[in-house]
Image (spheres, rainbow, N blue to C red):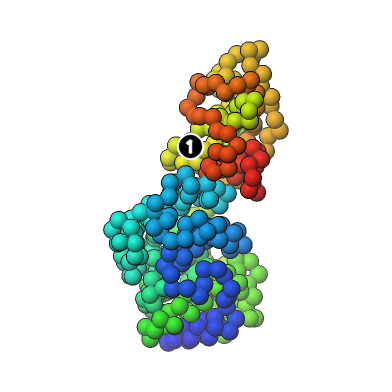
């Protein structure tokens, strides 16, 4: 293949790409890695604030590795996909234990670390070390499938591998650090700004003259992926046990599962199960609060808080412990629980 795409992307990024993101203009693999993990399934506007808070608390990989997991989950709360936070912590510890605090310099080695997949490894290796290796995140898949007219179903592993091969062939021919950084950042920028899922700005795209999807007049048909996520709905009852001093009874969620590793009000599948734990009606005063919906990736959670006011802290017949206001402010709490309890910093 000729170098048209690479040259166009490199030139466009220099003149029109994004240059003001807080994780850009650095060769620090810690910052690039942190941003790449946070940006998975999450918009830039959301990640900016989390990224700043993380760097303030964990300025380098050693600080992150030495921190308690609860501290990491606390700062991650509200960002979603909490397995990313757990893998982030494990990865930092592995970098310290196996690599003396220095991130590996090749994509192949980076992929051996927890939570770092092929595209994330390639992004770190290309942006920090100039390795000539392709990335293929969601934005880049959209750009490449449209440019190539690649209509293979990416739900099939064989087609995904084929697109990886194409992405590798389209890399800049000269293995120069500057070119790989510009090219890699440019491909991500194109997908995030011009080559959007809906209503792509084709008239401003540097690849428009050779883009097959543009020529066909159907860019929104690419990429092709037939497997759709099946959404479900679930109703859950929350026991909000509240002592007279303001302490709340919380339990740590199991791994794996919804909100794994976070501290949460005890969850129940139905109102009767909750009632059975606290005792028969008449002996306990339960207050049913307005229910609300919380949207997860694959399901809608309908949450039904039930408040139990107690005159003093007492052991409840369910796993957990009392947490005062100062403790709540330091815990990793699911976003809807943080908001319900009105913990500072709730969205």
> Is 297 placed above or below 59 here?
above
**Residue at figure coordinates x 50%, y 83% from the top left:** 10
Camera-nearest residue between 326 and 122: 326
Query: Residue 215's x, y, as percent?
Result: 58, 80
Camera-nearest residue between 129 and 65: 65
Identify residue for label 1. Answer: 253
In this view, the residue farthest toward the right is: 290
> Is 279 placed above or below 188 here?
above
| Secondary structure of residue under mark 1 | loop
Camera-nearest residue between 202 and 38: 38
In this view, the residue farthest toward the left is: 98
**Residue at figure coordinates x 43%, y 46% from the top left:** 68
In which quadrant of the rendered image does the N terminus lie?
A: bottom left
Camera-nearest residue between 38 and 62: 62
Q: Is 107 on the left-hand or right-hand side of 84?
A: left
Q: Is 2 on the left-hand or right-hand side of 211?
A: left
Q: Residues within 10 Å of mark 1 (few under 14, many from 20)?
A: some
Q: Where is residue 94, by image quadrant?
A: bottom left
> Is 63 placed above or below 26 here?
above
């Amino acid at each position: 293949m000729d170098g048209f795409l690479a040259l166009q992307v490199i030139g466009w990024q220099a003149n029109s790409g994004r240059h003001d993101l807080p994780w850009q203009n650095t060769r620090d693999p810690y910052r690039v890695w942190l941003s790449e993990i946070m940006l998975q399934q999450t918009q830039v506007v959301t990640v900016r604030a989390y990224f700043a808070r993380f760097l303030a608390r964990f300025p380098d990989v050693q600080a992150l590795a030495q921190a308690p997991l609860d501290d990491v989950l606390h700062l991650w709360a509200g960002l979603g996909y909490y397995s990313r936070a757990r893998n982030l912590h494990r990865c930092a510890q592995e970098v310290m234990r196996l690599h003396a605090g220095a991130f590996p310099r090749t994509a192949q080695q980076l992929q051996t670390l927890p939570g770092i997949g092929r595209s994330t490894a390639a992004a770190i290796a290309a942006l920090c070390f100039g390795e000539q290796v392709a990335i293929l995140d969601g934005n880049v898949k959209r750009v490449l499938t449209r440019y190539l007219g690649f209509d293979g179903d990416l739900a099939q592993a064989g087609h995904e591998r084929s697109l990886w091969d194409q992405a590798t062939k389209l890399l800049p021919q000269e293995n120069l650090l500057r070119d790989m950084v510009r090219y890699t950042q440019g491909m991500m920028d194109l997908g995030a700004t011009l080559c959007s899922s809906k209503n792509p700005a084709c008239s401003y795209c540097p690849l428009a003259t050779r883009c097959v999807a543009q020529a066909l007049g159907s860019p929104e048909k690419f990429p092709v992926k037939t497997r759709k996520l099946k959404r479900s709905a679930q109703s859950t009852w929350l026991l909000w046990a509240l002592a007279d001093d303001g302490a709340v009874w919380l339990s740590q969620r199991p791994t794996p599962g919804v909100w794994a590793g976070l501290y949460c009000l005890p969850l129940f599948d139905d109102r009767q199960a909750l009632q059975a734990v606290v005792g028969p009606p008449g002996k306990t005063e339960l207050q049913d609060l307005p229910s609300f919906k919380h949207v997860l990736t694959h399901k809608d959670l309908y949450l039904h808080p039930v408040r139990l006011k107690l005159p003093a802290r007492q052991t409840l017949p369910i796993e957990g412990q009392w947490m005062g206001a100062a403790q709540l402010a330091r815990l990793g709490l699911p976003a809807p629980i943080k908001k319900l309890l009105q913990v500072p910093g709730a969205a």
